[in-house]
Amino acid sequence: MQGQRIGYIRVSSFDQNPDRQLEQIEVGKVFTDKASGKDTQRPELERLLAFVREGDTVVVHSMDRLARNLDDLRRIVQGLTQRGVRMEFVKEGLAFTGDDSPMANLMLSVMGAFAEFERALIRERQREGIVLAKQRGAYRGRKKSLNSEQIAKLKQRVAAGDQKTLVARDFGISRETLYQYLRED
């Protein structure tokens, strides 16, 4: 049974261009998430999983674009192939059908482990870079969500007894961020 080719794209930030991931790859439909790989909320991936049917092929640029870690990768690939959906990873040049040999399953695990290892190295280098930048006085951290006037209003509302959850929602920040502002003097 010949189904349709469906692309899945995940970019880590809103300013990244998703088009290059499936450039020159022919697909009938594309699902795009704009979220970090560690983020468990990937609504377009969930839509894709609900959309695909037996005989379809899901095309992804690379394994690290599909899954957060090796367990997640194996779960998604096995879940799809058990439903008769073929998985293709362009960068790795691998395809999985569910009728895969032990060697194909080994390749999935090894390549997935390499992708997980690469992400860990990137995080480690990022942490080291931040430490060095802090030592040089060049690291300022993330830009504050609120300006000083908004922070003052936030503190006034909390002091007046407003519910912190509502205050956070009104300012478009998380409760944790609200508590960080309250701790500042």
Image: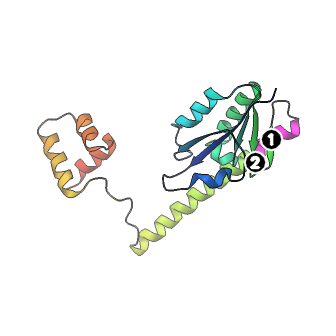
Q: Nearer the viewer, residue 51 or 144?
A: 51
Query: What is the quadrant of the N terminus in the image?
Result: top right
Q: Residue 129: where, in percent of width, then height?
A: 51, 66
Between 22 and 182, the one lying in front of the other is 22
> Badge 2 local density, few (<14 within 10 Å), some, or many (20+)?
some
Image quarter of residue 105: top right
Three-letter amino acid code at the position of disc 1:
Ala
Identify the residue at image location x=67%, y=50%.
22
Specify start and end residues of the magenta stretch as a single range. Answer: 99-110
Asked whether 4 or 91 is in front, the reply is 4
* Residue assigned mark 2: 111
Q: Residue at x 26, y 44 (%)?
A: 171
Residue 71 position within the rendered picture, expressed as x and y whole percent measured from the top left: 67, 37
Vertical arrangement, residue 48 with respect to residue 16, above or below: above
Rendered residue at 74%/31% (across/down) = 56
| Residue 95 numbered tag | 1
Q: Residue at x 75, y 37 (%)?
A: 87
Residue 82 pos. (x, y %): 76, 25
Q: Is residue 148 shown left or right of residue 9?
A: left
**Quadrant the C terminus occupies:** bottom left
Alpha carbons under labels 1 and 2: distance apart: 12 Å
Relative to 17, residue 138 above or below: below
**Dominant secondary structure (helix, strand or loop) of the stretch shown in magenta:** helix
Could you say whether the residue bearing mark 2 is in a helix, strand or loop?
helix
Residue 60 is left or right of residue 40, and the answer is right
Q: Amino acid at mark 2?
A: Met
The residue furthest bottom is: 136
Q: Is residue 86 above or below residue 12?
A: above
